[in-house]
Image: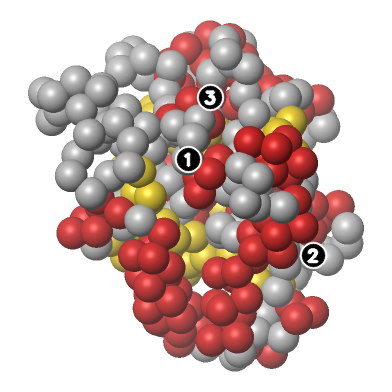
Amino acid sequence: MKAIIKAIEYYVPEGVLTNEQLAAEFPEWTPDRIEKKLGIVTRHIAGPDECASDLGVGAAKQLFASGACAPGDVDYLLFCTQSPDFFLPTTACLMQDRLGIPKTAGALDFNLGCSAFVYGLGLAKGLVETGQARNVLLVTAETYSKHMHPKDKGVRTLFGDGAAAALVSEAPGADAPGGLGPFVYGTDGSGGGALCVRSGAMRSHDGPDHVTAGHPFPDSALYMDGGAIFNFTLKVVPESLGALLTRTGLGLNDVDLFVFHQANVYMLDFLQKKCAIPNEKFYLCMKPFGNTVSSTIPIALCHAWREGRIRPGSKVVIVGFGVGLSWASALIEWAV
């Protein structure tokens, strides 16, 4: 029994925030400077009443409309978000009802950020290859815009909202193309404070207006220590990639495409050079979307597939890294 990605689609909200709009709010930054530094031109922003579940449902409906499967074929729903509709109930349970997925299906949320798609594929692979599920719908959706302070140009220029849905299923035969793994994971919770929202959950007792020492905005807003995240990334990503290639027995030339978490072009340029990945094998897809956190990798994979950059049998390496601190890498043999 072998798990494969059978289909992948994405959905972004209608609202758009352009570099020109941001430059009007922060005159010290020009549209060209934002694009040059981050590699982003626009980012999609969820409406006031538009939640992560709405984006996730949109992505799932796109997948169903593609003909890859019907809601009734799904027997497990994995939903990743760090901006759930409620503390409880589990957002995946609400999405099961909205999507018309059978009541016999399993459904759960997991809270992870930029490495989430890689982790989710590992979970889905385990469900399929142990016979617990035949069709796992893996949905990632994030609305970081709801966590951001309006005067924080560092995060507002970077993050966009979006969702993606991937169908992980049993391969039609042992000789059919496609496969998932191996996987390499990593966690360093000592750096959790480098990207966090401190208020709103059970650990916080100071209220949303409290300002933690060293933070420029209230605890209810997303805080990012960009320098710490950058230094962490430059250390762990090359190590994770090296460990994955060692486990697979592949060299850089054996991989058809590398798709890293689309953090920002400045960081990705450093990582590409440090990992010695050729330009033609390093895929970028962030100009129209920004950093959509857990959905950057699947959105990029969807575009690479549509552009013919990956085909059945292609070997694709994906690497996620960020909030947590958490990272993961995996090999995908493309099936569709």
Residue at (38% x, 73% y) in the render: 231
Closer to the camera in the image, 88 or 124: 88
Closer to the camera in the image, 207 or 118: 207
Residue type at tag 3: Ala
Q: Is residue 75 above or below residue 299?
A: above
Closer to the camera in the image, 192 or 185: 192
Q: CA distance from mark 2 to mark 1?
A: 37 Å
Mark 1 or 3, which is nearer the eye? 1
Question: Badge 1: how crowded within 10 Å, few (<14), some, or many (20+)?
Answer: some
Residue at (45% x, 54% y) in the render: 115
Q: Is residue 193 visible?
A: yes
Q: Which residue is mark 1?
A: 152
Label whose residue precedes the other's in the sequence (2 or 1): 1
Q: Which residue is mark 2?
A: 310
Task: Give x and y (percent) for residue 182.
Answer: 47, 69
Label whose residue precedes the other's in the sequence (1 or 3): 3
Figure disc tally:
3
| Image position of 193 (left or right of 57) | left
Label whose residue precedes the other's in the sequence (3 or 2): 3
Residue at (46% x, 81% y) in the render: 238
| Image position of 54 (left or right of 237) | right
Q: Is residue 271 above or below residue 75?
A: below
